Amino acid sequence: MTSKFPVNGVLIVNKPAGISSNKCLQIAKRLLNADKAGHTGSLDPLACGVLPLCFGEATKVAQYLLDSDKTYRTIVQLGIKTVSGDRDGAVTQTREVPEFSKDSILAVLDEFKGTITQQPSIYSALKQNGVPLYKLARAGKEIIPKFREISIHELDLLRWERPELELRVRCSKGSYIRTLAEDIGEKLGTGAHVIFLQREAAGPFDLSNSITLEQLESIVTTGAALPANVLLPVDLPLQHLPALHLNQAETRRLQQGQVVILVTPEADGIKRVYCDSVFIGIGEVKANNGLSAKRLLSYTTTV
């Protein structure tokens, strides 16, 4: 069966809690009858919220969403540690939770702002010798998780009602909220684990851009075309990159693998490239004002 829709674009799904990111992707892929798709950064089964899915040619720009900052809202329960750092794991330790003052909690949160070192959970999707850590952990294999530098841009206290902290976190790629919660719990002397996690934003996308799987299914079953605000343009995740506009002769040379010497001086770096206002891909300007192709879209017609 052929697809009802031209499935080239970005779909922002509001992933429900209780399923994996890959399961969410497979459901959307089946609904759209798409051949090629990928998600941009896993959410734990516990977590809900913004999960950008890239279809068709949009998979070529997925890395730029993977590298983007993320925003989360989480509820952390103090006084209980679990093996996985969240409510799905077995309890490993319990401690008393004092009636902390708001100022004392804010002082601890301040210690985690900026660039910090974090050791990801052994129940993460990071890989060791090609195998996800969570699979090794469940199999009882030895795991040597590596420390990594991350950036916590914002860490706000939304609510403190013993034993729960509700936080909003804006952070760099590679940040693990479960690990952050555990580290905050240790600094407070109580231990902690995550009982709720919602991704509110990923790069330029937030919950206002998102659609639930139920809403997507309802649209598809009507046989209507996907609205423009549902299947978003391929270049939308790249709006932070400078745009270059080529004429047809320059575009033809770029598509043939040649370096295009630009007439107007351009700063070195990655650019989004257009011809006649049509997005054709990603290029890079290097020395001598030369533009070379990095990722070109194949669904656009060669001029």
Image (cartoon, rainbow, N blue to C red):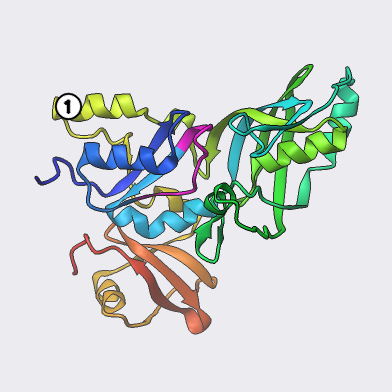
Q: Is residue 145 above or below residue 209?
A: below
Q: Is residue 158 above or below residue 246?
A: above
Outermost residue toward the front in this view = 140
Task: Verify whether residue 111 appears in magenta.
Answer: no
Q: Is residue 129 above or below residue 157?
A: below
Count numbered badges in the picture: 1
Q: Magenta segment, which residues?
A: 38-50
Q: Secondary structure at mark 1?
A: helix
Residue 213, by quadrant, is: top left
Residue 294, by quadrant, is: bottom left
In the image, what residue occupies the spot 46% across and 29% down? Answer: 18
- Where is residue 96 drawn, in percent x and y? 86, 22
Figure quadrant of the C terminus: bottom left
Task: Verify whether residue 42 appears in magenta.
Answer: yes
Type of the residue with mark 1: Thr
Figure quadrant of the N terminus: top left
- Where is residue 62 drawn, in percent x and y? 42, 55
Q: Is residue 79 above or below residue 148?
A: above
Q: Nearer the viewer, residue 224 or 44?
A: 44
Q: Is residue 145 visible?
A: yes
Give the labeled residue for mark 1. Answer: 221
In the image, what residue occupies the spot 36% across and 67% down? Answer: 295
Q: Is residue 262 visible?
A: no
In the image, what residue occupies the spot 70% across and 53% down? Answer: 150
Q: Residues within 10 Å of mark 1 (few under 14, many from 20)?
A: few
Residue 31, by quadrant, is: top left
